[in-house]
Amino acid sequence: MADDQEEELGLPGEAIVIRGGPMASRVLMDNALAEYRKSGRWALSVGASPSLTGDAIAREWPYEGRHYSPSTAAAIEDAGFRLIPDPPPPEHWLLMLGWESVEESTQVAEETWNRLCSCFGQEMPNPNWRGFKRDGNGQRN
Protein backbone atom coordinates (compact mmCIF):
# COMPACT_ATOMS: atom_id res chain seq x y z
CA MET A 1 0.00 0.00 0.00
CA ALA A 2 1.24 3.48 -0.78
CA ASP A 3 2.58 5.56 2.10
CA ASP A 4 0.00 8.32 1.53
CA GLN A 5 -2.88 5.83 1.84
CA GLU A 6 -1.36 4.32 4.98
CA GLU A 7 -1.04 7.78 6.53
CA GLU A 8 -4.65 8.62 5.65
CA LEU A 9 -5.92 5.37 7.16
CA GLY A 10 -3.67 5.42 10.18
CA LEU A 11 -3.46 1.68 9.60
CA PRO A 12 -1.66 -0.40 6.99
CA GLY A 13 -4.04 -1.76 4.36
CA GLU A 14 -3.65 -5.32 5.60
CA ALA A 15 -4.69 -4.36 9.15
CA ILE A 16 -7.64 -6.40 10.38
CA VAL A 17 -10.86 -4.52 11.22
CA ILE A 18 -13.77 -6.21 12.97
CA ARG A 19 -17.38 -5.16 13.40
CA GLY A 20 -19.43 -6.83 16.10
CA GLY A 21 -23.06 -7.72 15.79
CA PRO A 22 -25.29 -8.34 12.81
CA MET A 23 -24.45 -6.60 9.55
CA ALA A 24 -28.12 -5.74 9.04
CA SER A 25 -29.20 -2.31 7.83
CA ARG A 26 -31.57 -1.64 10.76
CA VAL A 27 -28.90 -2.52 13.35
CA LEU A 28 -26.25 -0.49 11.52
CA MET A 29 -28.55 2.53 11.26
CA ASP A 30 -29.48 2.31 14.95
CA ASN A 31 -25.79 2.13 15.90
CA ALA A 32 -24.85 5.01 13.60
CA LEU A 33 -27.68 7.14 14.99
CA ALA A 34 -26.57 6.37 18.57
CA GLU A 35 -23.03 7.50 17.73
CA TYR A 36 -24.37 10.64 16.06
CA ARG A 37 -26.43 11.50 19.14
CA LYS A 38 -23.44 10.84 21.41
CA SER A 39 -20.66 12.56 19.45
CA GLY A 40 -22.18 14.38 16.48
CA ARG A 41 -20.38 12.00 14.08
CA TRP A 42 -22.04 9.57 11.70
CA ALA A 43 -19.90 6.54 12.43
CA LEU A 44 -19.86 2.92 13.54
CA SER A 45 -17.71 1.44 16.26
CA VAL A 46 -15.14 -1.10 15.07
CA GLY A 47 -12.08 -2.83 16.44
CA ALA A 48 -8.82 -2.62 14.49
CA SER A 49 -5.13 -3.28 14.82
CA PRO A 50 -2.10 -3.27 12.52
CA SER A 51 -0.74 -6.41 14.17
CA LEU A 52 -3.55 -8.45 15.80
CA THR A 53 -5.87 -11.13 14.43
CA GLY A 54 -9.63 -10.69 14.56
CA ASP A 55 -9.87 -12.92 17.65
CA ALA A 56 -7.11 -10.98 19.40
CA ILE A 57 -8.78 -7.65 18.59
CA ALA A 58 -12.07 -8.97 20.02
CA ARG A 59 -10.26 -9.96 23.22
CA GLU A 60 -8.31 -6.69 23.56
CA TRP A 61 -11.13 -4.32 22.52
CA PRO A 62 -13.01 -6.05 24.42
CA TYR A 63 -15.99 -7.04 22.29
CA GLU A 64 -18.36 -9.44 24.04
CA GLY A 65 -21.01 -10.25 21.41
CA ARG A 66 -21.54 -13.69 19.92
CA HIS A 67 -20.01 -12.97 16.48
CA TYR A 68 -17.90 -10.46 14.61
CA SER A 69 -17.36 -9.83 10.92
CA PRO A 70 -13.80 -9.28 9.66
CA SER A 71 -12.46 -6.89 7.03
CA THR A 72 -9.25 -5.02 6.31
CA ALA A 73 -8.41 -1.34 6.44
CA ALA A 74 -7.79 -1.35 2.67
CA ALA A 75 -11.20 -2.90 1.85
CA ILE A 76 -12.94 -0.27 3.97
CA GLU A 77 -10.97 2.61 2.47
CA ASP A 78 -11.48 1.25 -1.06
CA ALA A 79 -15.26 1.30 -0.44
CA GLY A 80 -15.06 5.02 0.36
CA PHE A 81 -15.05 4.98 4.16
CA ARG A 82 -12.47 6.33 6.62
CA LEU A 83 -11.19 4.86 9.86
CA ILE A 84 -10.22 7.11 12.73
CA PRO A 85 -8.82 6.05 16.11
CA ASP A 86 -11.19 6.43 19.05
CA PRO A 87 -9.37 5.12 22.13
CA PRO A 88 -9.51 3.87 24.74
CA PRO A 89 -8.71 1.09 24.20
CA PRO A 90 -6.21 1.46 21.35
CA GLU A 91 -8.12 -1.16 19.34
CA HIS A 92 -11.29 0.99 19.25
CA TRP A 93 -11.79 2.89 16.00
CA LEU A 94 -14.66 4.66 14.28
CA LEU A 95 -15.69 3.80 10.74
CA MET A 96 -16.78 7.16 9.39
CA LEU A 97 -19.83 7.02 7.12
CA GLY A 98 -19.25 10.42 5.53
CA TRP A 99 -22.73 11.77 6.18
CA GLU A 100 -23.23 15.38 7.22
CA SER A 101 -26.89 15.44 8.22
CA VAL A 102 -29.87 13.35 9.28
CA GLU A 103 -31.49 14.10 5.91
CA GLU A 104 -28.46 12.77 4.06
CA SER A 105 -28.39 9.64 6.22
CA THR A 106 -31.96 8.73 5.31
CA GLN A 107 -31.38 9.42 1.60
CA VAL A 108 -28.30 7.24 1.17
CA ALA A 109 -28.53 4.72 4.01
CA GLU A 110 -29.39 1.58 2.02
CA GLU A 111 -26.67 2.19 -0.57
CA THR A 112 -24.22 2.86 2.25
CA TRP A 113 -25.10 -0.38 4.06
CA ASN A 114 -24.77 -2.42 0.87
CA ARG A 115 -21.35 -0.89 0.18
CA LEU A 116 -20.27 -1.35 3.80
CA CYS A 117 -21.45 -4.96 4.08
CA SER A 118 -19.56 -5.85 0.90
CA CYS A 119 -16.31 -4.95 2.75
CA PHE A 120 -16.84 -7.49 5.51
CA GLY A 121 -16.51 -11.26 5.42
CA GLN A 122 -18.60 -14.00 6.96
CA GLU A 123 -19.35 -13.80 10.69
CA MET A 124 -16.78 -15.44 12.93
CA PRO A 125 -17.43 -16.79 16.43
CA ASN A 126 -16.16 -14.40 19.08
CA PRO A 127 -13.75 -15.98 21.59
CA ASN A 128 -15.02 -13.54 24.26
CA TRP A 129 -18.65 -14.63 24.07
CA ARG A 130 -19.67 -16.42 27.25
CA GLY A 131 -23.35 -17.04 26.58
CA PHE A 132 -24.74 -14.10 28.52
CA LYS A 133 -27.23 -11.55 27.34
CA ARG A 134 -27.67 -7.91 28.29
CA ASP A 135 -30.87 -6.45 29.66
CA GLY A 136 -32.48 -3.23 28.39
CA ASN A 137 -30.04 -1.19 30.52
CA GLY A 138 -26.95 -2.82 29.03
CA GLN A 139 -26.27 -4.93 32.13
CA ARG A 140 -25.31 -8.60 31.90
CA ASN A 141 -27.92 -11.08 33.02
Image: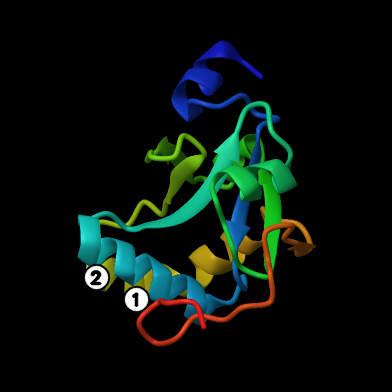
Question: Label 2 amino acid?
Answer: Val
Q: Secondary structure at mark 1?
A: helix
Q: Nearer the viewer, residue 136 or 132?
A: 132
Q: Is residue 106 found left or right of 24 in the rendered image?
A: left
Q: Which mark is residue 82?
A: none
Residue linked to disc 2: 102
Residue sitting farthest toward the bottom: 136
Q: Secondary structure at mark 2?
A: helix
Question: Label 1 amino acid?
Answer: Thr
Q: Position of residue 21 (x, y in %)?
A: 60, 69
Q: Is residue 20 above or below residue 66?
A: above
Q: Is residue 130 above or below residue 45?
A: below
Residue linked to disc 1: 106
Residue depicted at x 59% and y 57%: 19
Q: Nearer the viewer, residue 140 or 63?
A: 140
Q: CA distance from mark 1 to mark 2?
A: 6 Å
